[in-house]
Image (cartoon, grey):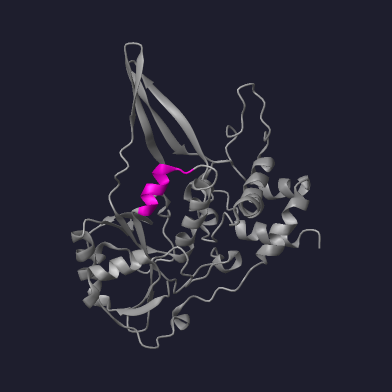
Amino acid sequence: MEIERKLLKKGSLGKLFEKITASGRRILAPVQDGENIFFKEVCSPEEVAKDYIQTTLSAKSAVFPACEKLFEYKFEGREVKIEDRDLNFKPTVIFGLRPCDARSFSALNAVFSWDYQDELFKKRLERTAVIGLSCGKADEYCFCTSVGGGPGDSQGSDILLTQIGSGDYLAEVITEKGKELVAISPELFEPAGDQDKEKYLAKLPKQFELKALSEKLPGLFNNTELWIEQSLRCLGCGACAFVCPACVCFDIQDEAKRDGGVRLRCWDSCGFSLFTLHTSGHNPREVQNQRWRQRVMHKFSYFNDRLGVIGCVGCGRCSRICPADMNLLEHLKAIAEAGK
């Protein structure tokens, strides 16, 4: 559909939140929690964090929880009774999602709708609408423009808000889900006029050429010296994977009890030494440089080759959170320069 431009007064946010909540939807928004900012359920814009560059964690768990029950099973004599999950998830509006995080839903959807349709993910995504918020500033870790995004990119948002000079919001209504949200309270949305959102967006020049990087990576697979140098500080802690909005690795575990049990799906990381450990004891990625290589190759080469999307949105969380101060952007720039 054609994008519709509207104006949402800053003072109208409270009424919009009320109408959304009254419609039976829950609202997830960034909330200050000490030094961190997490997505939590809110009822009022007064609860929403102010003046933040990026949340500590993305909103990925709204559609792909960190740990979730797939089903329960019970033993009844010699029979096993399976109790499937209830797929009637509550409709959700994610408010204040940055454009990079909104784009990550495309990467998640590409994986969970590829060779197998994941019903849990699919149902959650169907019942989720995104009111994105453009970035008026960035920090040294942000590189969304280098991976195809931007501070005002609309991909993945149903409505994208850009705060303009008056403090009001230019609202771009992008999808049918966005139109449904506007229809809840149409009187709050006014004609936008000729507002130019670009002057209110962060200026973020490209740091490398993505196409050239992706094409170069296969030829660097056996460049052991490069991968060792880049991974020397890597602790294999997995923090980068758990804050990443586009990481999709998971593990399946059965927790058994005497009369049955539950099957769980929980996030995992290719940076863990156990990730590829076979029952035989063999590990095809037995050292950390091989695991670091896998992370980079998967996100910037394999993902693109197989699914047509990049497994990174340039949010910078992995670099902000790394206890060893590894900076993904600097590593990617070094890879782009390798062999020149």
Looking at the image, the residue that sits furthest to the bottom is 194
- Which residue is rendered at x = 34% and y = 28% of the image? 72
Residue 114, percent across and down?
Answer: 54, 47
Looking at the image, the residue that sits furthest to the top is 77
Q: Which residues are magenta?
A: 117-126
Identify which residue, 3 or 288, lies in the foreground: 3
In magenta segment, residue 121: yes
User: Quick one: quadrant of the C terminus?
Assistant: bottom right
- Which residue is rendered at x = 70% and y = 60% of the image? 213
Where on the picture, by quarter, is residue 42? bottom left
Q: Is residue 335 visible?
A: no
Left or right, 56 with respect to 192, comes to right
- Which residue is rendered at x = 42% and y = 51% of the image? 60
In magenta segment, residue 254: no
Identify which residue, 193 or 132, lies in the foreground: 193
Identify which residue, 1 or 9, lies in the foreground: 1
Count of numbered circles on the image: 0
Left or right, 52 with respect to 76, comes to right
Residue 198, percent across and down?
Answer: 47, 81
Residue 30, percent across and down?
Answer: 34, 59
Left or right, 10 with respect to 317, comes to left
User: Quick one: quadrant of the N terminus?
Assistant: bottom left
- Which residue is rendered at x = 52% and y = 54% of the image? 107
Residue 206, percent across and down?
Answer: 62, 71
Where on the picture, by quarter, is residue 75? top left
Examine the residues drawn in magenta and state their main secondary structure: helix
Looking at the image, the residue that sits furthest to the right is 340
Q: Is residue 240 visible?
A: yes
